[in-house]
Image: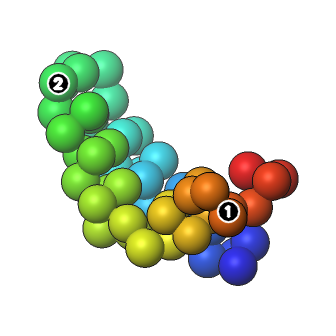
Amino acid sequence: MEQIFKEAMSALLSVVDELGQEHPAKIWVAFFERIEHYERLYRALLGSKGSPGL
């Protein structure tokens, strides 16, 4: 589970890095698109029965 989370975070951060500081609004759009892409993972990790370590 930890490895999957690391991969999801890496993918998220790479999208943000690609956009850089030039397009702050696009960074937020990309951020939420990645969250949507990994929705099931984030719900499992951050939901009411999620991992307390996160």
Residue 27 in percent (x, y) is at 26, 33
Q: How many marks?
A: 2
Which residue is found at the position 75% from the left and 61% from the top? 51
* Residue 17 to residue 1: above or below: above
- Count residues near mark 1 (Cα–Cα under 10 Å), then give few for <14, some for 14-19, many for 20+: few
Q: Quadrant of residue 18?
A: top left
Question: Which kind of residue does numbered mark 2 sit on?
Answer: Ala
Q: In which quadrant is the N terminus drawn?
A: bottom right
Counting residues from the start of the chain, the first of labels 1 and 2 encountered is 2
- Please name the residue shown 30% across and 68% down the image: 37
Q: Is residue 50 above or below residue 54?
A: below
Would you name the residue on which mark 2 appears?
A: 25
Kind of element beneath mark 2:
helix
The mark found on residue 6 in the picture is: none
Position of residue 35 in the picture relative to residue 29 (left or right): right
Q: Is residue 8 left or right of residue 23?
A: right
Instruction: Tell me the distance, in whole angstroms, between the alpha carbons under discs 1 and 2.
Output: 29 Å
Q: SS class of the residue under badge 1?
A: loop
Name the one closer to the observer, 54 or 23: 54
